[in-house]
Amino acid sequence: MSRIGYKEIDLPSGVEISQDGNVVTVKGPKGTLSREISPLIKMTIDGNVVKFDRDADTNKLKMLHGTTRANVNNMVEGVVDGYKKVLKLVGVGYRAQLKGNKLILTVGYSNPVEMDKPEDVEINVPDNTTIELSSINKEHLGNFAAEVRAVRSPEPYKGKGIRYENEHIIRKEGKTGK
């Protein structure tokens, strides 16, 4: 039984949700998001409450049930509040800068790494070692943050690299010399 799938989504004021076939569209104060959902999951809208139901109890449908509800809930939260991720650059000489639509990372390679900014992700670089990413789409934000982190992921010996703001890196002990 999917406990998450059977939870109702209460729509805040100012949020409109509509369904056209298998495409769900959510409009809110920060923007509009659309997503295609599985035709096996039935979505019903009763005023300010959205409910999800499934036809059968197979394992695949149980998984789709909870996932669909979570995705639509993330869309609702995104158009109301938005999402934000903060990345920190740790290391001597590591820095980030924003030039036009490109994020330029200098992280110890012979050449700086240039990354194109996705359309729906806002990038802010308040100082050389901090990157703030924000978006209404949680999935796109998480994917882009993971791509930026993968440029130089934190290493366990000195902790150098690009990490999320509250990420804890498990440190290893180096070689012990005699």
Image (cartoon, helix red, strand yellow):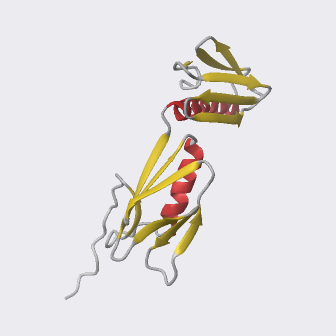
Q: Image quadrant of residue 4?
A: top right
Residue located at (24% from left, 81% from top): 176
Residue located at (33% from left, 56% from top): 168
- In the image shown, does 104 or 173 lie closer to the viewer? 104
Count of numbered labels shown in the rendering = 0
Q: Position of residue 145 (x, y in %)?
A: 51, 55
Q: Position of residue 84 (x, y in %)?
A: 46, 45
Q: Position of residue 172 (x, y in %)?
A: 31, 69
Q: Image quadrant of residue 169?
A: bottom left
- In the image shown, does 24 or 133 lie closer to the viewer? 133
Image position of 112 with respect to 68: above or below: below
- The N terminus appears in which quarter of the rendering? top right
Give the residue furthest to the left.
178
Give the residue furthest to the front.
100
- In the image shown, does 163 or 25 lie closer to the viewer? 25
Give the residue furthest to the bottom.
178
Give the residue furthest to the top.
47
Q: Is residue 54 left or right of residue 108?
A: right
Q: Position of residue 159 (x, y in %)?
A: 33, 68
- In the image shown, does 145 or 153 lie closer to the viewer? 145
Residue located at (68% from left, 16% from top): 44
- The C terminus appears in which quarter of the rendering? bottom left
Image position of 45 with respect to 157: above or below: above
Residue located at (30% from left, 66% from top): 171
Image position of 145 with respect to 44: above or below: below
